[in-house]
Amino acid sequence: MTTIAIVGAGPGLGAAVARRFGAEGFAVALVSRTQERLDQLAADLRAEGVTARGYAADVRDAESLTAALGRAAAELGTIEVLEYSPIPQREFLRPVLETTVDDLTAAVEFSVLGPVTAVQQVLPGMRSLGRGTFLFVNGGSGARPNPRVAGTSIAFAGESAYASMLHDVLAGENIHIGQLIIPGAIRPGHPTHDPAVLADTLWTIHSDRGEFRTFADQLDA
């Protein structure tokens, strides 16, 4: 059995992705900061027949993220898919003229250094399998900078550039990199922004291995 690691797992999109990939036979490693919440989510998923386990880590702490992903691979199976979608913190969502150096440092740790840490940890396992997928999930500012949310606009741009370069250099190794841009909020019951719909989209990105960037919906003009 191989594993999907969901970095930033929670009861919304993360749980939906866990269910979607779990239905396809993947074990699920849930990664976020709070072990108690992860344990509850994992228990709920196991009750639905999904093999799932939680691993607490802070994406801004490279040592803890590396250790969590290492334990997940050892206990559940090699990580074939990694989805990176932690929710940005409030200080990343300030207007550009109110955004400080400290705010940007934190945002870059969150959205650039965190993904680099995760990729470096799981890429050897994907290479051993001869296949793999990295799924990066970003808001609309990942494709169009927004001065009202400067931290994510700047950090998501770096994440997007990193992911796009990975897409180009790893394609020949059967390792796919896909980015899903979700303009606006994730909303249950919405035709394009419902968590289950987005999870289906992420499954399609993984299975079809098409273009680098996919939009959940059109960006506002």
Image (cartoon, helix red, strand yellow):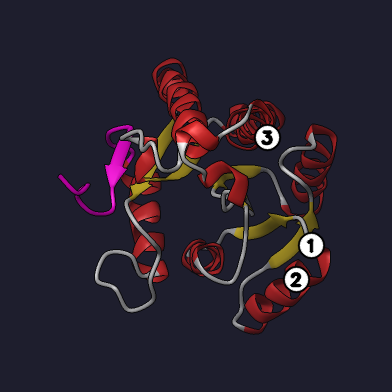
Which span of residues is magenta-colored?
209-221
The total of numbered circles placed on residues is 3
Give the mark, 3 or 1, whose residue is nearer the N terminus: 1
The residue that disc 1 covers is 34
The residue that disc 3 covers is 106
Position of 94 relative to 42 (above/below): above
- Alpha-carbon neighbours of circle 1 within 10 Å: few (<14), some, or many (≥20)? few
What's the CA distance linking mark 3 and mark 1? 19 Å
**Side of 14 where 37 appears, left or right:** right
Q: Amino acid at mark 3?
A: Ala
Q: Nearer the viewer, residue 112 or 146?
A: 146
Q: Residue furthest left?
A: 221
Position of 44 relative to 150 (above/below): below
Q: Is disc 1 placed on a helix, strand or loop?
A: loop
Which residue is depicted at the point 62% across and 59% down? Answer: 9
Q: Quadrant of the N terminus?
A: bottom right
Position of 178 relative to 42 (above/below): above
Q: Nearer the viewer, mark 3 or mark 1?
A: 3
Q: Quadrant of residue 64?
A: top right
Residue 220 picture location, percent across and down: 19, 49
Q: Which mark is residue 37?
A: 2
Q: Residue furthest front?
A: 97
Q: Amino acid at mark 2?
A: Arg
Q: Residue furthest top?
A: 169
Q: Nearer the viewer, residue 90 or 136?
A: 90
Q: Is disc 2 placed on a helix, strand or loop?
A: helix
* Residue 173 appears anywhere in the view: no
Q: Nearer the viewer, mark 2 or mark 3?
A: 3
Is 213 within the magenta? yes
Which residue is depicted at the point 44% across and 22% down? Answer: 161
Which residue is depicted at the point 44% across and 28% down? Answer: 157
